[in-house]
Amino acid sequence: MSVKFLDEEVPAVIDHVGWRLFEAFRLWKEAFVAGMVERGYSWFSEARANLIGYMEVEGLRQTELVRRSGLTKQAVQQLLDDLVADGVLARIRDPSDGRGNLVVFTEDGQRMRRDANIVKRRIERAWRRHMGDARFDELMSILKDLPERN
């Protein structure tokens, strides 16, 4: 069997906004993870750290973490178990509905959130130096204007 690597009928990959946003996010996330690992959160380089972005300050139900993340219940359960074992998150009885549990940040989790804000500000300062204040502010404004749904 022969494989054709290049065919005139295969369209070229175009430069597009999705790729540019993806690349910007990849660069940002690399810097963010490195900053968090540097601050002592070695688990931030692992998949479980992705759940943190879906959390709310006041906590939320595990089913909501499943919905927001798009992961299976089993995957969220495993990642959440790891974050609970790390002391970052905890499960508590939902005060508004005693039949369910909330996932909340522990004191260590709150400290991690403060450290994360420090790292995020450091990255933004670096990007501002690179782009200049006016261009960075324009970028932030444009990104805020993006529609929530297509």
Image (cartoon, rainbow, N blue to C red):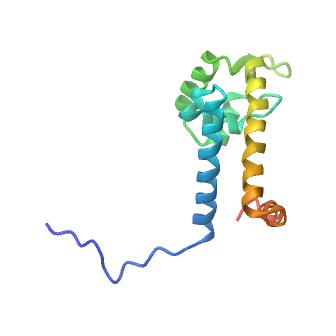
Q: Nearer the viewer, residue 72 or 113?
A: 113
Front one among 18 and 128? 128
> In the image, what residue occupies the spot 78% across and 37% down?
117
* Residue 103 visible in the snapshot: no
- 99 vs 57: above or below: above
Total numbered labels placed on residues in the image: 0
Quadrant where the N terminus lies? Answer: bottom left
Q: Is residue 137 left or right of residue 87?
A: right
Work out whether 9 lies above or below 82: below
Q: Quadrant of residue 146?
A: bottom right
Q: Is residue 127 above or below residue 8?
A: above
- For residue 123, side relative to residue 43 (left or right): right
> 78 or 138, which lies in front?
138
Is residue 62 at least partly visible in the picture?
Answer: yes
- The percent position of residue 59, horizontal first and vertical second, equals 78, 28
Residue 75 locus on image (x, y percent): 53, 31
Residue at the left extreme of this rendering: 1
Image point (33%, 83%), residue name:
8
Quick one: quadrant of the C terminus? bottom right
Residue 35: quadrant of the picture: top right
> Seen from this angle, which residue lies furthest bottom?
8
Q: Position of residue 69 (x, y in %)?
A: 63, 41
Residue drawn 58% across and 31% down?
48
* Residue at 61% across, 25% down: 80
